[in-house]
Amino acid sequence: MKEAALKPGRISGKTAARAGVLLPLPLSGPYDYRLTSADLPRGTLVVAPLGPREALGVVWGEGEGKIAEAKLKEAVPLEGHPKLPPSLCDFIDWVAKYTLSLPGVVLAQALRSRSAFEEEVGRVAYIKSGVVPARLTPARARVLEIAGDGLARSVAALAEEANVTPAVVRGLIDVGALHEVELPEFDAVPAPDPAFVAPSLNLDQEAAARSLKVAVAANRFSVSLLDGVTGSGKTETYFEAIAEALRRGKQTLILLPEIALTVQFLDRFAERFGVRPAEWHSDLSQKERRRVYRAVMGGEARVVVGARSALYLPFPELGLIVVDEEHEQAYKQEDGVIYHARDMAVVRARIENAAIVLSSATPSLETYVNAASGRYHWLKLPNRHGEAVLPEIKLIDLRHARSEPGTWISEPLREAIAATLAGGEQAMLFLNRRGYAPLTLCETCGHKMVCSQCSAWLVEHRYHRKLVCHHCGYECAKPPHCPQCGAGELTACGPGVERVAEEFARVFPEAKMAIASSDTMHGPAETQAAIRSMAKREIDVLIGTQIIAKGHHFPQLTLVGVIDADLGGSDGDLRARERTFQLLHQVSGRAGRAEKPGLVLVQTRNPEDVVMKALASNDRNAFYEQEKNFRERAHAPPFGRLAAIILSSHDGDLVRDAGRELAKKAPAARGVKVWGPTPAFYQILRGRVRERLLVQAEKSVDVQAYLRNWLALVKIPNAVRMTVDVDPVSFF
């Protein structure tokens, strides 16, 4: 990742009342406006006329002066002059330059809760006035007794606590027994207490926590990799860095890759600090987003846990960023502004002069190389916490351990499940494939059921009785006969988690089982309910996709079975082996996290593969060194740079012509190779034909400058959409 230059952070007070105002729209830069005052600093929020309407904008810098003073329209600051922190404005500029995005589109990421800037709406509540009503019924007496503690409550809250109807409360208001008071729109966000519970850390955790606290106290930019085996207590360790930030009056941002991971994390945070942190993710209501955004901007929210979009929150006192499971591909934003939240978190920490902690049991190769080279502090937790030990991992060679046709759980795995259930313990079966079967084809003519909008197979979801495309969402009923030949029967090929669950229920009919995938659990609430049921031992076996692979702690889970470890190991992606190893290592780490030892059985048809051998030998670093050498020889990241250009349109000829024109105009440059255009992995996606070009460059090359110069030479037709992905992590 190559750093871009930063802009100055403030408008000069000596300039005339003219400024560039950036609008959260797909515009190339700020527009000139006249301001009501020359002293409005960078980041001030204004209302700016734009054609026939008004738009929310941000004072960004000095105006260009290309428009005559008399023609300037006036931008008016919002009441109270709220403003984005200058450091956030600098961060937005940096992201725009690095990703080749329009600055206004990046700004829109930071203004997602526009209602947060509207005037605050107070709440009406009531307290006891001292007036005794002439008629004092038992119901009224209960209300007055509750209101007597002096706390202001709404009508609904008083009625609920006193177990009366709202009419009883309103009657007391009418006779003057309850006095009206006005409260702020939202209750105060409770502050976490760094001393709420004294931590219990082992020697390795103590040493790592001490280093992290020193980094926070230094009040300057630093990056630490917290590298610990699964179950080593990484979370409890970086909690001490959060406690240090709280003691020093600094805010903390914690990034998690999946919202489904939050349930146990929030509980653990509350156990340590007495309250839950503020949350920021797409599942919040508009009212909740407004509340959290205001609390962050005002400095009231001291700790925020969120998804990647939380990077754009307006922290005025940010002192620490934590990126948990930093290796996760979910941190990559693949549409709109395309960026990697882990990398941009490092940038934001640098701009804020803050400490950042990258935490993982299986770091990305980029982070591993940075730590090994000394660029990042490398803090290691080599052992599990307490009495727990790492699980034993055994490979089941499916070439020899054959099962009946149409079954997917081998005999050794069945025997291990039976023994686990007999011992009153829990098991987990993992297959990173949603639905019932990944392919449906005709037994007679071989016709494959393919999406009408994408060049992808339709996946059977037997529970919903549908064939579904996992890329565009297209779905249809499964035809009774082959639509191609009209006579053949359609058969399901290969297993998904639903098919594995069907087999499990047939073999173990008495066991309590649940399926965990994004198809069977709709939203974080259902996912978290299943996780809680597993933690409470209301479920014997959890069968799921990668949603169950990381972050969860189930003390009674002693067996993990991987149904198909070869899935995704060789899909032509330079990171395929790394991702496969990380995923299988993480899911293996769910076993034996308490005092009972764990066992992991990995079903594979290729036990000699380097990923399988590294898993079985529990030699992570040997695998990383081998992968590092492979990437270095190929000049691939982190030893080289990549950027992808994806062209798409409903007109295939237009896309192919645009791709050829782009390739023809690619400038010759030392250390740069341009590959393509070639059809994308999914040549048709959501009805659009897709072509890809790939730029491969030496690490010293300014890829952004090369791309800007190149793209300026070609006029792409309006009917063709062009997407630029700097540092791509997938190649679909």
Image (cartoon, rainbow, N blue to C red):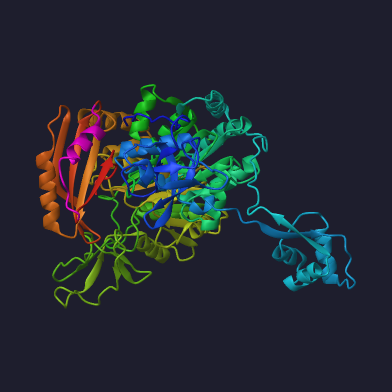
Q: Quadrant of the N terminus?
A: top left
Q: Going by the image, does 90 lie left or right of 210?
A: left
Does residue 430 lie above or below 668 as drawn?
below
Q: How many marks?
A: 0
Question: Is 285 contained in the magenta span?
Answer: no
Where on the picture, by quarter, is residue 456?
Answer: bottom left
Where on the picture, by quarter, is residue 625?
Answer: top left
Does residue 121 lie above or below 646 as drawn?
below
Residue 432, position as x, y percentages in the image: 35, 53
Where on the picture, by quarter, is residue 198?
Answer: top right
Q: Is residue 270 visible?
A: yes
Residue 630, position as x, y percentages in the image: 23, 31
Residue 5, position as x, y percentages in the image: 35, 29
Q: Going by the image, does 388 lie left or right of 346?
A: right
Residue 91, position as x, y percentages in the image: 41, 36
Q: Nearer the viewer, residue 608 or 220?
A: 220
Q: Residue at x 17, y 52 (%)?
A: 717
Which portion, as a residue range, is magenta?
A: 701-718
Q: Residue furthest front?
A: 70
Q: Nearer the viewer, residue 482 or 197?
A: 197
Q: Residue at x 24, y 39 (%)?
A: 643
Question: Is 711 contained in the magenta span?
Answer: yes
Q: Is residue 554 visible?
A: no
Does residue 476 lie above or below 600 as drawn?
below
